Image (cartoon, grey):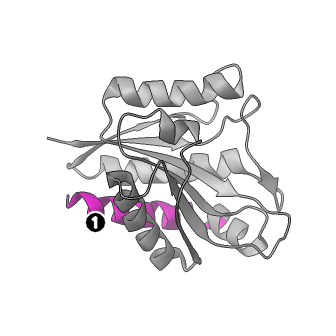
Amino acid sequence: MSIKIYVDQGHNPVNPNAGAEGNGLREQDLVYAIGQELAALLRADPDFEVRLSRPTRDTLLGTSNATSLAARVNEANRWGADYFISLHTNAASSSSASGSEAYVYARGTRAFGFAEDILDNLTDITGLRDRGVKARPGLYVLRRTRMPATLLELGFITNPGDAALMRDDPGLFAEGIYRGIKEYTGA
């Protein structure tokens, strides 16, 4: 029986719910590409089934931030996903902020272990700093999913090095996430 992974490419291509910008790049474009690469890895592995929140570059979810978030969560819940991963890029006022981090609803949960394995593999393969797994119960996609869920901040779009790595090698990020999923699930 396949393990169902719902990959949410965190933002719409345009508002509502478009993402951060930095270094001439848009978050929604970076996470779209990384999500597509991750889906390809999962589809090539018979242990997994995958669904993307944005199967095409132009897919637009919802008519507001709230309905965009609800559309992602509702689709994952309806499908009966076993795990939910929301892909994002971080942003900071300082261009020196760098690294990857993960958010989960609460510590001591299956989602926490899932996020730890993904973050460990992601930082190992990208070389970016591991900023840790943090509990953020207020985040809608973590609060409303019925399965273990993590929101990944892959790197800082406002850091020239992080941004270039995400732009130039989305497959590197996908591979790190994929390895983390494999490690956690034992698939």
**Is 177 left, or right, of 168 in this rendering?**
left
In the displayed structure, 62 sits above or below 143; it is above
Q: Where is residue 91 in the image (x, y as percent from the top left)?
A: 75, 59
Residue at left 70%, top 36%?
A: 13
Is residue 147 something that shows in the picture? yes
Local secondary structure at mark 1: helix
Which residue is more in the foreground, 135 or 168?
A: 135
Measured from the top left, where is residue 140 in percent x and y?
56, 36
Characterize the magenta stretch by its predominant secondary structure.
helix
- Residue placed at 77% from the left, 30% from the top? 15
Residue drawn at x 40%, y 58% is 112
**Left or right position of 41 against 135:** left
From what the image shows, is residue 111 above or below residue 118? above
Q: Reply above or below: 129 against 116.
A: below
Residue furthest top as drawn: 63
Q: Does the magenta stretch include residue 91?
A: no
The image position of residue 185, as x and y in percent, is: 24, 57
**Would you identify the image quadrant in which residue 70 lies?**
top right
User: Is 186 included in the stretch rendered in magenta?
Assistant: yes
Q: Name above or below for residue 99 compared with residue 127.
A: above
Looking at the image, residue 128 sits to the left or right of residue 83; the answer is right
| Quarter holding residue 181 | bottom left
Q: In this view, does 81 lie to the left or right of 118?
A: left
Instruction: Give residue 63's quadrant in the image.
Output: top right
Q: Mark 1 points at which residue?
A: 183
Residue 115 position in % (x across, y down): 42, 59
Q: What residue type is labelled 1?
A: Glu
Q: What stretch is highlighted in magenta?
A: 168-187
Residue under the point 58% across and 67% down: 100
